[in-house]
């Protein structure tokens, strides 16, 4: 970890360095908030390559989702200015259909981006409720479940849950959104029937079944290709999926430890088709993001 921390100080973004220091050495939350605020626009949304695979400077729901995850992870106060402005952005951002903020914006195409962030008229059909179901959860979580923000969150969540319960399969990144949403809204589970028309247990059971089906079980390919692994969903032993996936989780932890380079850092398993110079920068940024995420997981399982 000392080598990984040194790598972050040399090559990582200030944001990931602040997160590392917050999670592993008692660094101040204010440093994370300050670094994250550099990506926030006047309308409260986030852009400027916060998600390193698309460099759109204007606010987007997807970049704002990434910011929201960070704010949840550091337990930012809902009335903190950066959170308050993000809540306002989500309230004002137009949905493309009930419950669904646009996942990809047409303006993406004018800036360096990975091919999966290319906007087309049919793009939303691929993304569906990624990241909208988690954005809805943010609004409910930060508002305490009451008021206009919660109303938008609950109505958006209703559409997303209806889609999930009828789906035979869901793209795995979207399933991560659903699983994170459920983790965040567990304190509100008794309200699900009245707010979204189904029980928390129904939604959780469907998400669980789809996740268990989509997780890659070809251990020989782990670390060599971009596939959904157990630790993409299970972040600690407290996760409800952990008992069912324990042997696979333990193997995934072993692969994480095995695949670090001499600096204690992981490389990414994806690339762009275009923009080679910008991709080299994005790759470095993602390595920093992976370092923070994976060392947190390793620490949660006592594997360091």
Image (cartoon, rainbow, N blue to C red):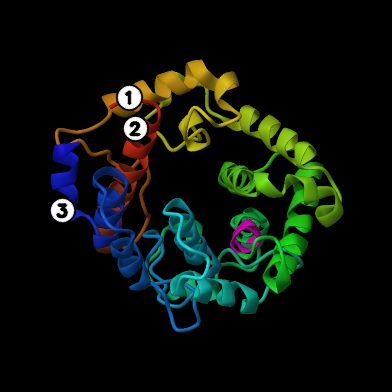
Image side of residue 129 versus residue 275, left or right: right
According to the picture, the residue beneath numbered tag 3 turns out to be: 9
Q: Secondary structure at mark 2?
A: helix
Work out which quarter of the rendered image holds the N terminus and state it: top left
Q: CA distance from mark 1 to mark 3?
A: 23 Å
User: 7 and 69: which one is in front?
Assistant: 69
Q: Secondary structure at mark 1?
A: loop
Residue 282 sits inside the magenta stretch: no
According to the picture, the residue beneath numbered tag 2 turns out to be: 299
Q: Is residue 257 visible?
A: yes
Residue 238: % across, % down:
53, 30
Residue 126: % across, % down:
63, 54
Vertical position of residue 224 compared to residue 17: above or below: above
User: 175 and 76: which one is in front?
Assistant: 76
Vertical position of residue 212 compared to residue 112: above or below: above
Quarter-of-image position of residue 285: bottom left
Image side of residue 66 versus residue 295, left or right: right
Residue 148: % across, % down:
72, 73
Q: Nearer the viewer, mark 1 or mark 3?
A: 1
Q: CA distance from mark 1 to mark 2?
A: 6 Å
Q: Which region shows up in magenta?
A: 136-142
Q: Label 3: few (<14), some or many (≥20) within 10 Å?
A: some
According to the picture, the residue beneath numbered tag 1 turns out to be: 303
Residue 219: % across, % down:
44, 20
Q: Which residue is located at x 55 percent, y 25 percent? A: 242
Q: Secondary structure at mark 3?
A: helix
Vertical position of residue 276 compared to residue 168: above or below: below
- The residue furthest top is 247
């Amino acid at each position: 970890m000392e080598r990984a921390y040194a790598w972050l100080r040399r090559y990582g973004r200030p944001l990931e360095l602040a997160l590392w220091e917050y999670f592993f050495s008692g660094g101040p939350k204010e440093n994370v908030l300050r670094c994250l605020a550099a990506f926030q626009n006047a309308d409260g949304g986030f852009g400027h390559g916060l998600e390193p695979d698309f460099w759109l400077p204007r606010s987007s729901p997807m970049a704002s989702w990434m910011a929201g995850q960070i704010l949840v992870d550091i337990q930012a106060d809902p009335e903190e200015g950066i959170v308050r402005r993000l809540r306002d952005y989500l309230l004002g951002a137009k949905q493309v259909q009930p419950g669904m903020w646009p996942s990809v914006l047409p303006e993406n195409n004018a800036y360096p981006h990975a091919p999966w962030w290319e906007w087309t008229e049919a793009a939303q059909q691929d993304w569906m409720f990624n990241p909208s179901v988690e954005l809805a959860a943010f609004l409910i979580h930060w508002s305490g479940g009451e008021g206009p923000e919660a109303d938008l969150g609950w109505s958006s969540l209703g559409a997303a849950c209806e889609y999930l319960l009828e789906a035979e399969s869901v793209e795995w990144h979207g399933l991560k959104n659903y699983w994170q949403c459920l983790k965040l809204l567990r304190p509100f589970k008794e309200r699900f029937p009245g707010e979204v028309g189904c029980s928390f247990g129904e939604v959780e059971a469907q998400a669980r079944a789809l996740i268990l089906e989509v997780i890659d079980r070809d251990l020989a390919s782990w670390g060599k290709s971009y596939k959904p692994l157990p630790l993409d969903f299970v972040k600690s032993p407290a996760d409800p999926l952990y008992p069912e996936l324990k042997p696979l989780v333990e193997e995934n932890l072993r692969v994480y430890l095995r695949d670090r380079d001499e600096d204690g850092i992981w490389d990414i398993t994806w690339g762009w088709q275009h923009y080679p110079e910008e991709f080299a920068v994005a790759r470095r940024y993602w390595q920093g993001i992976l370092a923070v995420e994976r060392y947190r997981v390793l620490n949660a399982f006592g594997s360091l």
